[in-house]
Image: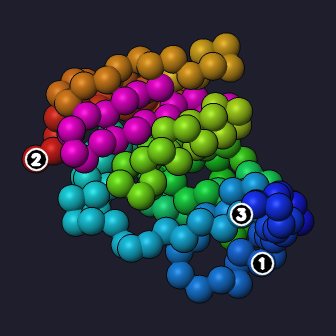
Amino acid sequence: MEYFREMGATKMIPRYTYDDYKNWEGNWELINGIPFAMSPAPQPKHQRISVRLSTIFDNALSQCKSCVVYGPIDYKISDETVLQPDMLIVCDEITKQYLDFAPSLVVEILSPSTASKDRLYKYECYQKQGIPYYLIVDPESEEVNVYELRDGIYSEAASAKDFQHHFNFPEACTADINFSEIWQ
């Protein structure tokens, strides 16, 4: 439990763990023991972009035997932090009911209720976890920011609406992605 003062009174903030989280109904993320509801459901444009981007990456990686594209799954970083990225690429076998190691790529598609969390907290969290690629997709401006991990720090490799980018994954798997295709 964490304590803080508000107008002279001490308030207690409960902290939750993965054991609590897995019993909750609905869609949630758990960040440093604090639950965040993931509702309402994403807007249709968000979902369309997610499906298109997943399909494009899946097609690009069709010859790769080790890298798999996933939609939202539990990414358990610690007992008090469980995130559900919009899309992940995992280049190793997942043997549990959740992912417990760093994926090769994570995508967050911004929505008004999650934009600051995706740009600030998740950016720092994914960087700290050593995830090689972090993509932030903005449906409103129709832009994609591609961040690549270099010497433990994210560097913006590209940011635009229409561009092509080359990704290198483990086991010599590669993907050349034309981001203009996700807006069609």
Residue 20's tag is 1
- Magenta-highlighted stretch: main secondary structure? strand
Observer-side mark, 3 or 2, equals 3
The residue that mark 3 highlights is 34
Residue 89, position as x, y percentages in the image: 50, 46
**The magenta stretch spans residue 12:** no
Give the residues drawn in magenta, as a range: 130-147
The one nearer the camera, 76 or 43, is 43
Q: Amino acid at mark 1?
A: Asp
Determine which residue is flagged by label 2: 184
Q: Who's the residue at 21% across and 39% down the image?
A: 142
The mark that comes first in sequence, 3 or 2, is 3
Please say if 43 is above or below 87.
below
Q: Residue at x 49, y 68 (%)?
A: 38
**Quadrant in which residue 151 is drawn:** top right
**Three-letter amino acid code at the position of disc 3:** Ile
Which image quadrant for residue 166?
top left
SS at badge 2 = loop
Between 94 and 158, the one lying in front of the other is: 158
